[in-house]
Image (spheres, rainbow, N blue to C red):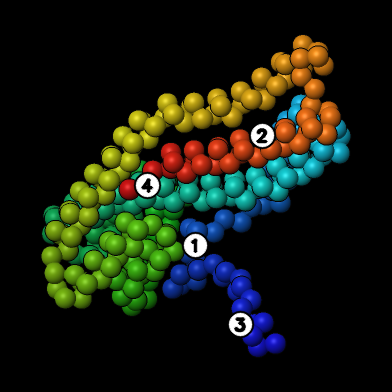
Amino acid sequence: MGLFNKNKKEEYVPKTGILGNADDYSVYEMKPVEKILYFVLAAVVGAVVGNIFYENMILSGIAALICGFVFVPVRKKQIIAKRQQKLLLQFKDMLDSLSTSIGAGSNVHDAFASAAHDMEMQYTADSDIYRELKIILAGMANNINIEELLLDFGDRSQQPDIISFANVFDTCYRKGGNIRDVLKNTYRILCDKIDISLEIKTMVSSKTSEQNIMLVMPVIFVYLLKQMGSDVINLTSSTGRTSTTIAVLMFAAAYWLSKKILNIKI
């Protein structure tokens, strides 16, 4: 029994921060309405495609269920990745504000307070970066070390750049290093990284468009062939359905591989 419990996968507990009121950016809990909406959307697409390929209600229903159950977690990952990317862009602007304030002679607390005001004006009070800055300021007001708050922010963000900045800030702040240079260098490196990332996305955008077209073309092609009559193509036989299933699996594997190739990370 002990061995069973040891090998059993533990459920992930979202991190809520030092003060217990922060978000874990690697977690997104879909509302029931969202789950139903995405499931139905994917199921409808799966049913239509399944009907084109198989012309069988049962097989179309199975395809609809598979698409629905597969798409919901995929969509959840997409939402998490989009939020993390948005947070990173906001974090870059926060560093710019901090660097400007500290360069003008402000202390760390005043610099973060000024950055919070700037982020509220730039991104509104509902933005993630503004909420994080308010948490940092509240923590400092409760005598929590700034470096601990930043390390916690980095841990919850799951962003290597934010984690790296928090670690460097922690070492520099405790050892009396030049915070101004740390902020300036981190901001410059992050800007360069984001610019390169945008250039790469621009370069592969045409390939991404081709990938999306190739996702739809086989379905349209098979549909047009079937409209010409059963003499042109017949997928209702056992051989036809077997070959269709193999082709669909190969196509899905090729699409997944192309997504991996085009997902270039710096």
| Residue that lies at the very extreme toward the front in this rendered image | 239
Kind of residue at disc 4 = Lys
Mark 2 neighbour class, 10 Å CA radius: few under 14, some 14 to 19, many 20 or more: few
Amino acid residing under circle 3? Lys
Residue plotted at (14% across, 73% down): 176
Residue 51 visible in image: no
Foreground residue among 76 and 245: 245
Residue beneath disc 4: 265
Image mark for residue 247: 2
How packed is label 3: few (under 14 Cα within 10 Å), some, or many (20 or more)? Answer: few
Q: Is residue 65 visible?
A: yes
Query: Label 4: few (<14), some or many (≥20) within 10 Å?
Result: few
Nearer the observer, 6 or 196? 6
Image position, residue 250 (x, y; %): 62, 38
Separation of marks 1 and 2 at Cα, in angstroms: 40 Å
Which of the two discs, 2 and 3, sits closer to the camera?
Answer: 2
Q: Secondary structure at mark 4?
A: loop
Separation of residues labelled 3 and 1 (CA atoms): 26 Å
Find residue 16 and report its horizontal and vertical position in percent: 50, 68
Residue annotated with mark 3:
6
Image spot of residue 233 (x, y percent): 76, 19
- Residue 24: mark: 1
Q: Quadrant of residue 10?
A: bottom right
Is residue 39 left or right of 151 when viewed as pictured?
A: right
Q: Earlier in the sequence, mark 1 or mark 2?
A: 1
Q: Is mark 2 in CB contact (under 8 Å) with mark 4? A: no
Q: Residues within 10 Å of mark 1 (few under 14, many from 20)?
A: some
The residue located at (22%, 55%) in the rendering is: 186
